[in-house]
Image (cartoon, grey):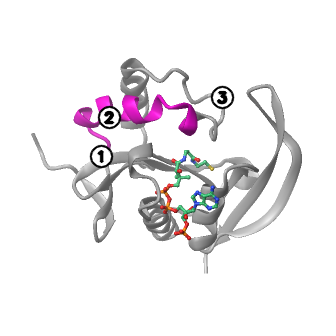
Amino acid sequence: MRDKFIIVENGDVKLRELTDSDLVKLSEYANNEKVSVNLRDAFPKPYTLKDAENFKKMIDLQSPKTFFAIEFQGEYVGNISLSVRDDVYRKSAEIGYFVGEPFWNKGIATKAVSLITDWGFKSLDIIRIHTGVFEFNKSSQRVLEKCGYIKEAVFKKSVCKNNKIYDEIRYAKIKE
Ligand SMILES: CC(C)(COP(=O)(O)OP(=O)(O)OC[C@H]1O[C@@H](n2cnc3c(N)ncnc32)[C@H](O)[C@@H]1OP(=O)(O)O)[C@@H](O)C(=O)NCCC(=O)NCCS
């Protein structure tokens, strides 16, 4: 098998292409209510191996590639992506990420978000990276703040998740 293609790294955290050997772990870590509750309903629930395979097929077709695996100490632990927008928003990208629960609170997402943000501003024709975080997701808000993302707005009662209504906190970082 050829080497896993590494995009960027910082110590024990690497962003690299997703490989077939990650898919069992992807389906295991993604099939967790504590993960999916923080994500849009398009994220499959339950999350099966077939969902992981379909996800890989989708990202294998991407050019340029902007969806990556997060590796920690040599082990697959989660995913991170930039989705470049179109039309008048074409200089913006939305960031998305998750880390498997066994690896939470080790600083992994903070390193991964910093890495993909710097990479995105260097490698893609974008000047803004943004995302929306559900109001109860304090961990992700903290990650974005640690990475220099600015809280720009609260979209009041904009999210309906599990039949409950929540605010969404919008964060963005502008290319320096
Ligand atoms: C959000 C997520 C990516 C964070 O990953 P992680 O690797 O644990 O993040 P880090 O360890 O880099 O940082 C977490 C920070 O949040 C803090 N935190 C964790 N739980 C918290 C809580 N309930 N309240 C306040 N802060 C909290 C941690 O203490 C840490 O901050 P610190 O370094 O100042 O102590 C991970 O929990 C996850 O995948 N969640 C599900 C999917 C998701 O939310 N994706 C993002 C959608 S916007």
Q: Quadrant of residue 142?
A: bottom right
Q: Residues under labels 1 and 2: Cα distance? A: 7 Å
Question: Where's ligand 1: which quadrant?
Answer: bottom right
Q: Give the camera-side residue of 40 and 63.
A: 40
Q: Per the image, is 21 magenta?
A: yes
Tag 2: amino acid: Lys
Label 2, residues with CA under 10 Å away: few <14, some 14-19, many ≥20: some
SS label for mark 3? loop
Q: Which mark is residue 41?
A: 3
Q: Which residue is mark 2?
A: 25
Q: Which mark is residue 76?
A: 1
Q: Nearer the viewer, mark 2 or mark 3?
A: 2
Residue situated furthest bottom in the rendering:
176
Q: Is residue 61 visible?
A: no
Q: For the residues labelled 1 and 2, say whether their Cβ atoms are less than 8 Å apart.
A: yes
Tag 1: amino acid: Tyr
Q: Per the image, is 163 magenta?
A: no
Q: Residues under labels 3 and 1: Cα distance? A: 24 Å
Q: Residue at x 33, y 65 (%)?
A: 8
Q: Sequence-wise, which precedes: disc 3 or disc 1?
A: 3
